[in-house]
Image (spheres, rainbow, N blue to C red):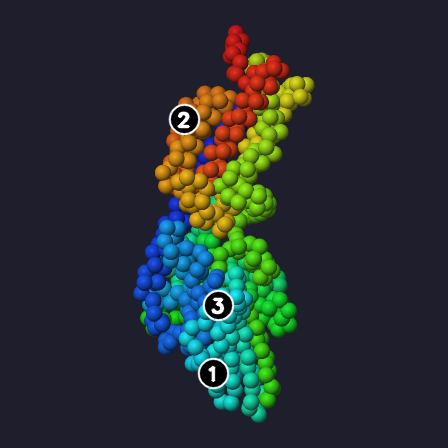
Amino acid sequence: MEQQRNILLIVLLCVTLMIFWNWESDKVNAERLAQQQQEAAQSGSGSEINDADVSGKSIKLKSDSLDLMISLKGGDIIDARLPKIKQEQDKDDPFHLLMSNGAFTYQAQSGLAGRDGPDAKARPEYKSESDQYVLKDGEDSVSATLVTESDGVKYTKVYTLKRGSYVVDVQYKVENSTDKDLSLCFYGQLKQTVDDSYLQKNTGFGMVASAYRGTAYSTDSTRYEKLKLDEIVSDKQENSSLYQETKSGWVAMIQHYFVSAWLTPRDSKDAHVVYTNAVKEANGEYKNAMIGIRTDNVSVPAGQTRTFDADLWLGPKNQDEMEAAAPNLDLTVDYGWLWFISVPLFKVLQFVHSFLGNWGFSIIILTLIVRGLMFPLTKAQYTSMAKMRLLTPKMQELRERYKDDRQKLGQETMKLYKQEKVNPMGGCLPLVIQMPIFIALYWMLMESTELRQSSFMLWITDLSVHDPYFVLPILYGISMFFLQKMSPTPITDPIQRKVFMAMPFVFTFMFCTFPAGLTLYWLVSNCFTIFQQTVIFRSLEKRGLSMKAPPKAKAAK
């Protein structure tokens, strides 16, 4: 059983290595994206936007939570910044979510298509009474109105922002003053440049994933489905783009901590279609991928008016707010296949934070709760291991007696376990449970936007990035070294012995790049385990069960 436990520890090391490799890949991709966004922001300032689908002037719509730039051609949101959230912790620049320039495009587009839709052939030119709409003190909302007319039909597009909200209300009003019926549909789509440098395919160990960047959608039949941008391009080239009918749902583009999503109205009776598309450039390449949702074609009778409504989420992955905005939108906080562990862990963390107001101390309390719940298993583990050590002479005697009869040896061994009331797997169970909890915690801490730029204490000013002075990783390595010295894991195999001797150094190196929040969890976990083992070992010694290895039995002559 000691051999099995050692193997499980090696497996845990391998899992951690895979998490480290994926974390490094995600960190490099995030740095590339941040640099690209910064370059885009520097070259895309001003009202003139250099983009194939965007030209002419734009207007500004600003609230306390969103700062939007809307192009008068097509009425698309071509730039979005989040004033409450910093791009970088030590700078005042707001986070830049949507942007448009020649190098990188990320837009939220909407319009009216179909047989008589003004966007069917070319994007319409809108007019606005003002070039700037800003939420004033004492006001709860602010709206920007865009108007265009074509062949006796007036189209009014209204964007509304509410105080403290990341939801953009979009309303399209069609006034048909002609003597013929109109057939058109409303669509909302998200467009983004496909860049293979930061949209690498996720390879490696199946249980581990880096932060996802791509598209996602929800329909009546699919609560949450992901689709990468490069896959949309491949599907377009193969003429197999996504086309799925639904009455409700949403489409989204996701990145680490942030999401943009077109949402169908909760009380909508219109049938919708979720679709993907890609735009071919003049050189034949597909540069931009799109995912959208549109209504079926509807009729606007002569002399009547029809209104279309939709919501657009532009903001961080705040689970409670997203859940209130649209069903299943909170699933964009992607915890992976161990979500059933990650979700309750986050709920506990959130509950503790509501009292403490500090995410770092909340992680410490969460650690103590998790380790405390595992205390009975840990105690049973060491009790089982101590009993197994007492049985070592008898086990060696059985091996010598039945060395030529493996079946009889197995029967007598199980009989001995039953007589002594020993569970041979009791020493492995806590490790088996610990591995999925570790992976679930990794996903939970990596995906929780609440930890982004959240200060703990002293030099730890951002729990979502690594410790800048590497104090926590070093303390973790020291605690792991002492924990190894305490743990009763006698290893005779020289290769395994070298692996275990190197583990504190390897783990210290890996945790130097891990988020400080995750490192803090494991440091506190190790310290609590040292205390836990001290208590358990003393309790076992009082019962006459020692964790020290018994002397080797003399071989039979």
Numbered disc total: 3
Determine the CA span between mark 2 and mark 1.
73 Å
User: Residue at image x 50%, y 50%?
Assistant: 450
Label 2 Cα crowd, 10 Å radius (few <14 / some 14-19 / many 20+):
few
Whether residue 276 can be seen here:
no
Instruction: Give the numbered dot on residue 136.
Output: 3
Front residue of 352 and 369:
352
Residue type of the residue flagged with mark 2? Met
Confirm or deny contact between disc 2 and disc 3 (CB under 8 A): no
In this view, the residue farthest toward the bottom is: 179
Residue at image coords 62%, 63%: 220
Horizontal side of 313 relative to 58 (left or right) equals right
Percent of width and height locating residue 247: 62, 68
**Disc 1 marks which residue?**
148
x then y, percent, for residue 363 = 52, 40
Sequence order check, earlier mark of 2 and 1: 1
Image depth: mark 2 or mark 3 in front? 3
Front-lying residue, 405 or 382: 382
Q: Tell me which amino acid carries mark 1.
A: Thr
Q: Which residue is mark 2?
A: 501
The kind of secondary structure element at disc 1 is strand
x and y percentages locating residue 288 in the rendered image:
40, 66
* Disc 2/disc 3 C-alpha distance (Å): 63 Å
Instruction: Measure the C-alpha gap from mark 1 to mark 3.
Output: 27 Å
Instruction: Return the disc, 2 or 3, that comes first in the chain's sequence.
Output: 3
Q: Report helix, strand or loop for mark 3.
A: loop
